[in-house]
Amino acid sequence: MENYRTYLTEEELPTHYYNLRADMEKKPAPLLNPGTMQPMTAEELEGVFCSELVKQELDNDTRFFEIPEEIRDYYKTFRPSPLVRAYNLEKVLGTPAKIYFKFEGNNTSGSHKLNSAAAQAYYAKKQGLKGVTTETGAGQWGTALSMACAYFGLDCKVFMVKTSYEQKPFRREVMRTYGAEVTASPSDTTEVGKKILAEFPGTGGSLGCAISEAVEAAVTREGYRYVLGSVLNQVLLHQSVIGLEAHKALEKLGVTPDIIIGCTGGGSNLGGLIAPFMGEKLRGEKDYRIIGAEPASCPSFTRGKYLYDFCDTGKVCPLAKMYTLGNGFMPSPIHAGGLRFHGMSTILSELYDQGLMEAVAYEQTEVFEAAEVFARAEGILPAPESSHAIKATIDEALKCKESGEEKVILFGLSGTGYFDLLAYQQFNDGTMTDYIPTDEDLAKGLAFVPPQPEE
Ligand SMILES: *Cc1c(COP(=O)(O)O)cnc(C)c1O
């Protein structure tokens, strides 16, 4: 019998990030300057982002980027992450499918986000910056960035979506412990925050609002840049370490997955997990079914439109072509805070549009039912976000049970749910509700999408 957990040795850890775009024949659409509708230049982006990260963002051709030794050293404090064979879940489900998961929750931030935070903090420090600003939804990204900033010696200002700030005070304290300054968003500390508060009084905020505030806070301060924890090409690039490790570990086991599953908020954990596998698929070497699992309350892939849209509510960011619900979409306050973003990575959007991956949407109660089954079987308390991937995995494993097919399923367990106990409490009390936006709600969000560039 195979080991329950497969770890790589330090020598086997990836030395390079893999840039999936290099293998895409049709590249993801470029970011556009909303003023000129022309592709954003490096110079324009460098006002907001670190120079090295701008280079990575715009590079569609370089297949591998060396991971600097300083970042690799830091990775060793929490990587490799284990590849786990979910024997107990298989048994509970009675499925002939083989289920593996790559567990990214084994660090204090509790999620995969530290992989990119480490890189972004390192490049900011190397550029001689004083600090960085960012937004955080559920708090995982803010926590990850606080940790990375503490390690590399940078100031860190976090705008935290107000509902999370109120629901997850413990997250806030973790960030403060690592030295970050945490502000509830929308706030009156920025012009865009004041404007949003005037327009939507009493709003619980959204990732889109918090992004606008964090960008403003960066560009109005000397020596600061803005960093983003998902959606961007550079973030998917950094997260490729998840997929590279998983690919190597499976190779050591002599196993090839048939289906690869991950939850999708902005697309970074799935984009990272699938990177080397999708590369093989694009080069025609192998074929995999790839599935993104999203909340029915914020269904960017399954009900969004493939359009140029702002990444933020305040419309201060460039336009990205992506599956979007519209920058005016205000998702209901579901517990999977990390999946409440109106848009999606341009890379995954393009792959989805080309039919190279699929997407499914689930309501939160059924997601928590899946989380409970998983927790009881495998012992790990999953994040509500990750539980969307668990739900999709269980569905596929049960299909295998029906058909008798022994498929191999690999899914991304992006994080743990220790800070989501209010959500678990509601689930356990039976007071959790599901909310699916109506077509009218979606039309309202899409009404904010700007005029499209001419083809
Ligand atoms: C942020 C987060 C997500 C969603 O973000 P992606 O960029 O889509 O990966 C998923 N799971 C966890 C645990 C997160 O913290």
Image (cartoon, helix red, strand yellow):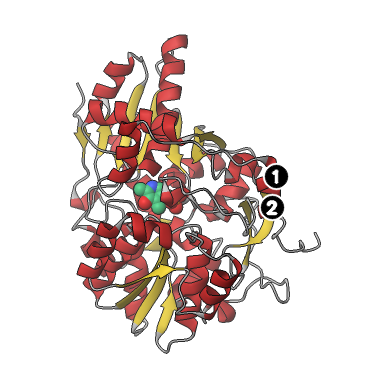
Q: Is residue 333 left or right of residue 139?
A: right
Question: Can residue 109 be spotted in the picture?
Answer: yes
Residue type at mark 2: give it: Lys
Q: Is residue 322 left or right of residue 250?
A: right
Question: Can residue 247 be spotted in the picture?
Answer: no
Residue extending farthest to the right is 454
Write the residue at 65% across / 60% down.
309
**Dot 2: element:** helix
**Label 2, on which residue?**
444
Residue 329 to residue 188: above or below: above
* Disc sitting over residue 440 in the figure: 1
Separation of disc 2 and disc 1 at Cα? 6 Å
Residue in front for this viewpoint, 79 or 424:
424
- Callout 2–callout 1 Cβ contact below 8 Å: yes
Q: Position of residue 396 (x, y in %)?
A: 45, 23
Write the residue at 54% across / 55% down.
21
Circle 1 packing at 10 Å, graded few (<14), some (14-19), many (20+), is few
Residue 35 to residue 160: above or below: below
Q: Position of residue 432 (x, y in %)?
A: 41, 36
User: What is the quadrant of the N terminus in the image?
Assistant: top left
Residue type at mark 1: give it: Glu
Write the residue at 32% across / 33% down.
429
Write the residue at 50% across / 59% down.
206
